[in-house]
Amino acid sequence: MSTRDLYTEPPSDPLWQVPATGAARFSWEYDEGRDRLLSLYQKGKDKQWDGVRRIDWELEVDPYDPLGTPDEALTLHGTRHWARMTERDKAELRRHYASWQFSQFLHGEQGAMICAARIVESVPDMDAKFYSATQTMDEARHAEIYGRFLHEKIGMLYPVNDNLQSLLGDTLRDSRWDMPYLGMQVLIEGLALAAFGMIRDTTDKPLPKQILAYVMQDEARHVAFGRMALRDYYRQLTDAELREREEFVIEGCYLMRDRLRGVEVLENFGISKAEAHEFSEQSEFLHLFRKLLFSRIVPCVKDIGLWGERLQRAYVDMGVFDLGDHNLDLLMAQDEEIAEKLDAERFAAEEQERVSEVTDAIRAGAES
């Protein structure tokens, strides 16, 4: 079945073309590089994996409750609409929300793949080109995995959210080589990481937990790469150039915050856009969710040297200023550990099953 047949509202054009500007940069220096970045590149090579083999696609998923989402987490909970909904309506609402979330993950991963390829093309340093090449493959794998989950397990996709599409377009159209880093590695990937982590840590469903844990293991390296490259570069910029980047971050953060309302889902249930916005503003869960989603972005922005007065005021306005002191390295280390622990538990259980099968076969042979 074509993806177009699974969209809640098919895109008017199957291709979105973004005119790109900027130079492709070649470097003839092949022997020098930053040790930390080259180590990250080596890790990127070592940690490549196959989504077909590493993920257990045989696990069953209920498309009407794919994430085990509690009632309280749904924006309509407690409203007059909720009181009129049947259990079937509520199950359909869960399916739509999961489809909407994972569809935005999918579209974001395609954007990340294209941005990583742009970085290979435009970044002046060979060590950064090397690492970005491994990231391009990572993002392709993530898009493949999210696409498969939506097609095979949920059977529904949502178009790209307007705000996500706007930020992707702004990131790709900018001619400055550092902007794909800033727009994708810091803003879009930082927000996605926090969203992945919240679902990974709260879902009781094994397949989405596997997918998110393994994707996050890769994304932790990507954010580390963006931090290293931008921190080095932004030390060289003038105050005026830094202010330009901060303006981009402010606008991008407001766009990403507004992306998280899920208004498109409620519109598909006959609720007006104005009322859907009102419900999202009133949702205590959504308020908490939106704040926690900036837990990866704010400390990263501060770490790379973008922490001017206007940017700080914007974060105060969003209610996320205090997140600047979060330990980003600790969060990334935890992402790595969770994926490795999940692997160890899964493969130990599989090994025990094989041992039991062999033992049973030996016993059956002896008895016969």
Image (cartoon, rainbow, N blue to C red):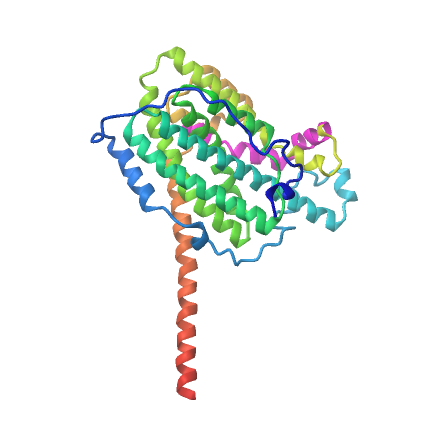
Residue 63 on image: x %, y %: 63, 51
Q: Residue furthest bottom?
A: 368
Give me the residue at 55% from left, 21% from top.
317
Rendered position, 352 above or below 27: below
Give me the residue at 74% from left, 34% from top.
271
Residue 112 on image: x %, y %: 46, 34
Give me the residue at 53% from left, 39% from top.
106
Give me the residue at 24% from left, 33% from top.
35
Q: Which residues are magenta?
A: 274-300
Is 4 positioned to the left or the right of 244 in the image? Answer: right
Q: Quadrant of residue 246?
A: top left
For the image shown, how many numbered marks are present on the structure?
0
Q: Quadrant of the C terminus?
A: bottom left
Residue 83 on image: x %, y %: 77, 43
Residue 140 on image: x %, y %: 44, 41
Magenta residue check for 286: yes
Rendered position, 346 above or below 131: below
Magenta residue check for 58: no
Rendered position, 9 above or below 256: below
Is 69 positioned to the left or the right of 228 in the image? Answer: right
Principal secondary structure, stretch drawn in magenta: helix
Say if residue 10 shows up in the picture.
Answer: yes
Q: Quadrant of residue 23?
A: top left
Say if residue 68 shows up in the picture.
Answer: no
Is 294 positioned to the left or the right of 340 in the image? Answer: right
Camera-side residue: 99 or 314? 99
